[in-house]
Amino acid sequence: MNAKYDVVVVGGGAAGLSGALTLGRARRKVLVIDAGEPRNAPAAGVHTYLTREGMPPRELLAAGREEVIGYGGEIVTGAAVAAERVEDGFRVVLDDGSAVVADRLLLATGLVDELPDVPGLAERFGRDVLHCPYCHGWEVRDQAIGVLAIGPLAVHQALLWTQWSEDVTLFLHTGPEPDADQREQLAARGVTVVEGQVAELEVREDRLAGVRLADGTVVACQALAVATRLTARTDLLAGLGLKTEDQEMAGHVIGTRIPADATGATNVPGVWVVGNAANVTDQVIVAAASAVRVAAAINMDLIMEETRRAVTARRTSTGHAGGPHRHAESHGGTGWHGVSLPPEEFWDAFYGEKSQVWSGNPNAALVREAADLAPGRALDLGCGEGADAIWLARRGWQVTAADISRVALDRAAEHARAAEVADRIDWQRHDLDKSFPEGSYDLVSACYLHAPTDLPREKILRAAAAAVAPGGMLLVVGHAGWPSWEHNPPEGVHFPTPQEVLDSLEPAAGEWEVLRSEEFERTQNTPDGEPGARKDNVLKLRKLV
């Protein structure tokens, strides 16, 4: 394996391999991680798959792996045990301790069939204990077929199986009692209804012979249909900030899936889902087909990001952006790169270069200074990708979060939905030099309001101070100098001290109480990932009148 891929596909079933094949043909660098334990392994063949009808599942997957490899894709046998967002994409850890990084993730992890606790059922699942008539009905046509009721869809299931056999028995087991209309439907289709719970399966010469009830009665049948609960695998979800949701059929829950939009995109930017993990009812051919559509969406998402980078590079090379820009947190003054782009375009291009720019963690100074404050109304200026606003919302604050970049705000809103605090944050686009959020606030936070574009920082901070309600707090955090790795900083850049910030607010006597005014040092990784250091400062004020 290589260290970095365009896309890592977790799961090498029909959906995962189909997605990898599509991406490989799009000349993407793709890795498929597969544990080699397909859900349909016990089945004798794959059905309703045009041109592959009846092919053994492992043969189908082996052919798919060869095709993926033929287009440059890589496949590794192993289980993905953890995944998380990192600065340059997503890091996936395998069960052997190795790890890879990808710009995008495609989850094709499939699902788990949760079977009722009946002795002998699990051992025969996929052979003569069946779940889908379209997958297995032809193979057991005209045989004695039992249907094990465990939920409210059992009558529907029994009626469905009458298309393949006239000898269908519904074992009520733990399912609900059919009403009068349902019993009439069953009788009209010749379905026998058997009361009582099933105790175990009767097997002779490795073939299902019948069902033994709790009272000892044995009812002969050659195949037993059971509607399993279909549960999406959740091993990687917590680290990515994903959750499952219930999937219903006819108003009844039949399992869980990972929610996604029509393109397969989840609510975590950069993560897609396909196959049974996204829709528990998809058959093999449907899962494979949908993966083509999802892979195309991933490829286009990568193309758009690469285009944004190319535009930025072109502007840089032609002088439109005034030279290569630094990591945004390095900026500590105004205009030192001679940036000529309008501020909104500059910041949209900045955030568009990566699927995630910042760590996703709130600023340490905000956490330290606001952790003990009683929640109220907060204003987060220059909110970026929303980590500070989300942290405040999780602690009970009602937050207005402002930024000039629509790209950043859209991304922040997605993160808030994933964190389940979207209803507590109002995302507003403002060029703070020209417009400012309305209202008064119990906390106004301005963390690292530095920019390489012309930024009237003093004017913005005065507006911030005016927005603080009596008794409320103003928190201003900024850089006190260039970082340790900046060996040739631009000349003429001044980093205001806390006292200079306070003086610039033009406070009236007795208007503010200074709670903290100090400089501090913190560690921060360099752009190359090495440990570095920088000095920052903080000014924390309480408004008295």
Image: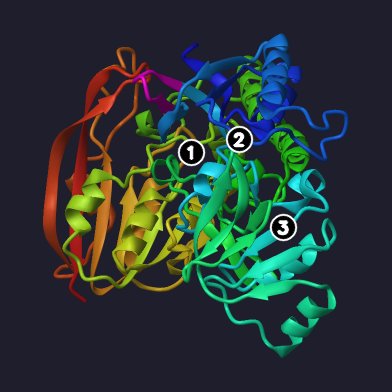
Please tell me whether residue 432 is drawn above or below residue 443 in the rendered image: above
Q: How many marks?
A: 3
Which amino acid does the dot numbered 2 rest on? Answer: Pro
For label 2, the SS is loop
Please tell me whether residue 298 is drawn above or below residue 119 in the rendered image: above
155 to the left or right of 359: right
The quarter in which the C terminus is drawn is bottom left
Where residue 415 sits in the image (x, y, percent)?
A: 47, 51
The residue closer to the viewer here, 379 or 542, is 379
Question: Looking at the image, is mark 3 or mark 2 earlier in the sequence?
Answer: 2
Label 2 near label 1: C-beta < 8 Å? no
Q: Residue at x 14, y 70 (%)?
A: 510
Foreground: disc 1 or disc 2: 2
Where residue 214 sits in the image (x, y, percent)?
A: 47, 68
Question: Disc 3 versus disc 1: distance between alpha carbons?
Answer: 76 Å
Density class for disc 2 (Cα within 10 Å; few <14, some 14-19, many ≥20) is some
Label 1 near label 3: C-beta < 8 Å? no
Which residue range is magenta in the image? 92-100
Q: Which residue is mark 3?
A: 145
Foreground: disc 3 or disc 2: 3
Residue 13 visible in the picture: yes
Q: Which residue is mark 2?
A: 42
189 to the left or right of 484: right
For label 3, the SS is strand
Q: Which mark is residue 454?
A: 1
Q: Is residue 300 magenta?
A: no
Where residue 239 sits in the image (x, y, percent)?
A: 39, 41
Question: Which of the 4 image quadrants contains residue 256?
Answer: bottom right
Please tell me whether residue 462 is drawn above or below residue 25 in the rendered image: below
Foreground: disc 3 or disc 1: 3
Question: Looking at the image, is mark 3 or mark 1 earlier in the sequence?
Answer: 3
Q: Residue at x 83, y 73 (%)?
A: 189
